[in-house]
Amino acid sequence: MRNESIPYKIYLSESEMPTAWYNLRADMKNKPAPLLNPGTHQPMQAEELAGVFCDELVKQELDNDTAYFDIPEEIRDFYKMFRPSPLIRAYRLEEKLGTPAKIYYKFEGNNTSGSHKLNSAIAQAYYAKKQGLKGVTTETGAGQWGTALSMACAYLDLDCKVYMVKCSYEQKPFRREVMRTYGASVTPSPSMETEVGKKILAEHPGTTGSLGCAISEAVEKAVTSEGYRYVLGSVLSQVLLHQSVIGLEAKTALDKYGIKPDIIIGCAGGGSNLGGLIAPFMGEKLRGEADYRFIAVEPASCPSLTRGVYAYDFCDTGMVCPLAKMYTLGSDFIPSANHAGGLRYHGMSSVLSQLYDDGLMEAVSVKQSEVFEAAEYFARTEGILPAPESSHAIRTAIDEAVKCKETGEEKTILFGLTGTGYFDMVAYEKFHDGKMEDYIPTDAELKISRDKLPKIDV
């Protein structure tokens, strides 16, 4: 039954928007392990990273101690085009499920890119422009990040070169065309444009690609092109920092009505959405001020947390990027082309990996047919067509609400709705036509890529 004192949508005013990003690492007792130089296996220094990333982003990446970074006014002005984003009470979903649970979701799809990715895209593009660069290079999986970055670069008059995972490039031509509309060049990866792309194609003929492959190509293009730097849409600590606006806004909205979530759920590929959503709540937990249950939801076809190993690994398939300690399936792992979402990265953010290893966060994996069942159910009750990635969180939120129905517990659930699924209709079509496959890698298949992990003595 609807509580008339709590609206369907809780909106914040512009004056209530965060003025600083929150750096979760500052409150972590066990800091994430440092990035390592792939040649020397020593911690990466700022001058080494500066050849790949923008200078200001390098500072953010390496800073484990500063709790808050001021958001530049220019970025806040850009945010005002689509932020603050609404926090929505899922009254219809609760009623349909017949659950005593209270369900809230933070909706990040109210912008042309259709996802939360724009929060970090504009920040990274801003620092590239401020540094006087010509442009940036990047990779994209399902296309949300590439779309967001192309928008940000168009706004700031920067060139944008995108390497898009080949299976997504072919499955999602309209996402590709949105990027091109905003001026980006889009190349299916792996390609013959780069030396690392040629090498990957030689070793994996006919491969449909992976985020690890696309990262390798984008990095090579950046370091061989004068006036360019590489930017990344997930995984890195700087990205989780920018995405903290999601959690900061969500917490402010909940606090206005005296609401405290018991369970916080997010989809997990590289970690940007999940890390941003949980940041201020996890900070409270780390400081001993409150307790929450955090659940990361990943695809069964690419289960880095639930079936990976916690070890140093390359961030990319071409093995040209720094080594990161993370839960990983191995940089050589290439997910099934049948996987319909963008959660296709072989590893998990070092920040989230450390939190998971410390027992501060749970993880579950779900099959994509179950994900699309939840997506359809949600669309028919809440009226929003969710992205496949977001629907992983929806699946687990529904499962937790059903458990509350069975036990009679009145828990409050918060999950992140990262974006919309209007460019994912090929996947929805496969689901509706009964052609969607639930491919889950075998232990033997995972062992092949895990056995290739670099041997690091640290």
Image (tube, helix red, strand yellow):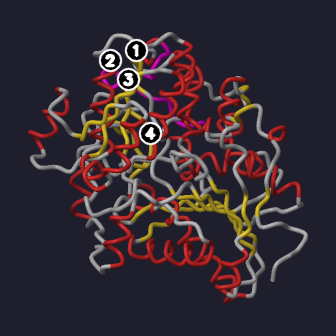
Q: Residue 37: within the magenta?
A: yes
Image position of 392 with respect to 380: above or below: above
Residue type for callout 4: Lys
Disc 2 or 4, which lies upstream in sequence?
2
Which quadrant, please, contains the N terminus? bottom right
Residue at image position (21%, 39%) is: 190
The reply to whether residue 303 is in sight is no
Per the image, the residue denoted by label 3 is 37
Say what secondary structure mark 3 lies in: loop
Closer to us: 408 or 386: 386
What is the quadrant of residue 196 in the picture? top left
Cα–Cα span, label 2 and label 4: 23 Å
Residue type for callout 1: Gly
Residue at image position (78%, 51%) is: 251
Category of crowding for the residue at label 4, using alpha-carbon neighbours closer than 10 angstroms: few (below 14), some (14–19), many (at least 20)? many
Per the image, the residue denoted by label 2 is 223
Instruction: Verify CB contact (< 8 Å) between mark 3 and mark 4.
Output: no
Per the image, the residue denoted by label 1 is 51
Per the image, the residue denoted by label 4 is 325
Boundaries of the magenta span: 31-46
Disc 3 or 4, which lies upstream in sequence?
3
Residue type for callout 2: Val
